[in-house]
Amino acid sequence: MRKISLLFLVLAASLSALAVTPADPTNVTWYDCGDESGNSYLTFTLPTVDVNGNPLDIEMMGYRIYIDDDQMVSFNSSQYSNVYGNTTELYYYNWEAGSDIQSGGVYFYRTNADGYERFFNNRIGIQVFYLNDNFGIGGVSNIVYTELAPVVALPKPANPKIEEWIDYGAYIETPDFYFIQGSYMSYSFARAWDGTAWQLIDVDGNYLDTDKVSFSIYTDNDQVFTFTPEMFDQVEEPTTQFPYNARSYSGNVGMTDIHFNDLTNDVDGLAEIGVEMERFFDWRIGIRTNYTDGGQTNSSDIFYMEIYPQLQEAKNVTTTSFLADWSCDAENTFIINNFVGDGCGYFLHVVDKATQEVVLTQNVVPTNTYLDELNHTQYLPGATYAVEGLTPGTTYEFYVEVKQNTGMSYQSVVREVTLPQEGHGYDLGDVNHDHAVNIADVTALIDYLLNSASEVCTICADVNTDTNVNIADVTALIDVLLSNGTN
């Protein structure tokens, strides 16, 4: 014990010696050129001493740029010639005179001017770091900001909605004659009647100044869409925030809908004639309302419409059944009501892989619901469905298809599950199926519950035989081990 304690003291002393803390940078100023030409810049004076006044080796120094709520700025080698890949750390060997990144300032291809996606809202700053002997980041200075605008409490707009999505795909007559018909989305904003007209409202029901309102489109993992003049007549400069009052009764961005020309997810047919193009998105599309005033913006939540079901691997597999799961618990993600009803909704398809015989086609109502502000039942996206009455030892393919009331359909990935044979050594509690029931099975079961690991024997994991695999089975398995004297 004495030896270990001494070792810790030596290590602590060594780490303390390596953690040199630089003094703070000074003279931090920002100039915005008003466009994205690369002439906006942040200037500063870097320290040459640490907080105690000791001189620093500048070859062991670097800095990071921050904006607003201590968000680090990333630099990309495609735009900055003296960095490698994507990085938030700028080192001494990047400080070259005449380049965009220097020892006294950084030039940015960003702006806070109207008509562009804002670089930051109210402040930009710099922090200096010092490398340790292992060339990892050791001590750091404070972040020194230049405040450009005071933070004000802006109203948060109430959430908008997507009412409908239609992908018209591509029209292909011959390989030499085709055109992309594009996609269509209808939407609505949260409004209230003021006695004379409908007004946009914030989350507290207060009316908003429509001149300060815009909206943004998002896809998949919160990737913001850019409106360009080439696609939208009402746009003069590329923007991610389309002004509410710029909507029109004609043009691509209408009062209640958007036509995305030349953008589609239906690219398979084009690939067959040798035309390669990227999908518009892979999973979902969303909309957000923005309120901008005094150079700052507050936004609603992103309201998503899930288009393609996110089907998971089969769960709770037994000799004659499995659970299909494409539920979704992402915040602010909703399923549109017209997915539910005759001829539309979630359709689960199960096929015998060997014979290609269709075993099941089932219209599944979304599993979870909630009550909206009008006390109407709304559906959360996705569902689960227990597929039963299957044949032991058989391999099945299964997938989910979403059918809209427009007739369009969107299919998930195809999953595969092989049911175990009856009487083939699947012992209750043998979660990792190593033909022994011991503490390793407890670990495997907990890992399965935390990470949904698909390699466990889910039949064996249902220790309390209630057809569900959950924390109660961990308790039951521990009881089995204790009663058997297993350790």
Image (cartoon, rainbow, N blue to C red):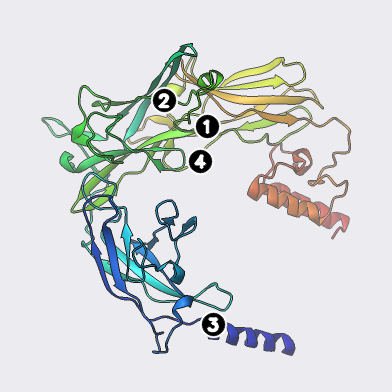
Residue to which mark 3 is pinned: 18
Mark drawn on residue 337: 2
Q: Is residue 342 above or below residue 100?
A: above
Whether pointer 1 and pointer 4 mark residues with C-beta atoms closer than 8 Å, the reply is no
Residue 10 placement (x, y as % from top left): 64, 87
Task: Look at the numbered disc 1 and give the secondary structure of its residue.
Answer: loop
Quadrant hosting residue 465: top right
Query: Is 448 or 107 nearer to us in this picture?
Result: 107
Task: Return the disc, 2 or 3, that comes first in the chain's sequence.
Answer: 3
Which badge, 1 or 4, is on the more N-terminal residue? 4
Residue that badge 1 annotates? 382
Please tell me whether residue 127 is drawn above or below residue 306 in the rendered image: below
Which is more N-terminal, label 2 or label 4? Answer: 4
63 displayed left or right of 480: left
Amino acid type of the residue tagged 3 in the rendering: Leu
Distance between the Cα atoms at labels 1 and 2? 12 Å
**Dot placed on the residue nearer the N-terminal end, 3 or 4:** 3
Amino acid carrying mark 4 in the image: Asp
Q: Residue at x 72, y 14 (%)?
A: 357
Which mark is drawn over residue 146?
none
Q: For marks 2 and 3, give the CA distance.
A: 60 Å
Q: Nearer the viewer, mark 3 or mark 4?
A: 3
As shown in the figure, which amino acid type bears the numbered disc 1?
Gly
Spatial CA distance of label 1 from label 4 is 9 Å
**Residue found 21% across the figure and 58% down from its top:** 152
Q: Can you tell which mark lies on residue 329? A: 4
CB atoms of marks 3 and 4 within 8 Å: no
Where residue 89 sits, quadrant-wise, is bottom left
Q: Secondary structure at mark 2?
A: helix
Q: CA distance from mark 1 to mark 3?
A: 52 Å
